[in-house]
Image (cartoon, rainbow, N blue to C red):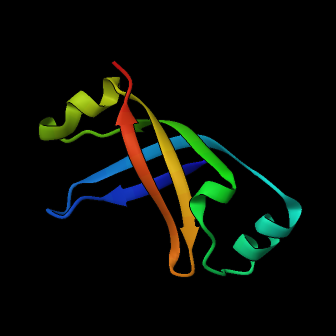
Amino acid sequence: MRVPLRTLDGTLLVMAYRGVRSGPSEVLQRVARGEAVDPASYYYRVAGSFETASPELTWLNTVIAVAVGSRSPTGPAYEVFELL
């Protein structure tokens, strides 16, 4: 999947990623319905990369990232880490 992003200062970039979400069926059904679910009760991981033409963010073009995700009633959230 590819998603366009905009930084707080208006800079555009694209994140390409692939993820896995798994867990007990009843937990995933609750997540799909948008209910609040403890993130420790299911597995949600993402691997991704970035693309930007911004001179200030070109370093992102060489980053491989992994993330731990969760889904709340307001939408997904990710804690993203750069692989070194």
Total marks shown come to 0
The answer to which quarter of the image holds residue 60 is top left
In percent of the image, x 78 and y 67: which residue is there?
27
In percent of the image, x 22 and y 28: which residue is there?
59
Name the spot of residue 66 as percent of width and height, x first: 47, 35
53 in relation to 8, above or below: above
Q: Nearer the viewer, residue 8 or 78?
A: 78
Q: Is residue 30 left or right of residue 39?
A: right
Name the spot of residue 20 as percent of width and height, x first: 69, 44
The answer to which quarter of the image holds residue 82 is top left
39 in relation to 54, above or below: below
Q: Is residue 42 left or right of residue 71?
A: right
- Name the residue furthest right: 25
Q: Nearer the viewer, residue 17 or 58?
A: 17
In percent of the image, x 51 and y 46: which residue is there?
68
The answer to which quarter of the image holds residue 73 is bottom right
- Name the residue furthest top: 84
Name the spot of residue 22 as percent of width and height, x first: 76, 50
Q: Is residue 76 left or right of residue 79?
A: right
Q: Is residue 56 left or right of residue 4?
A: left
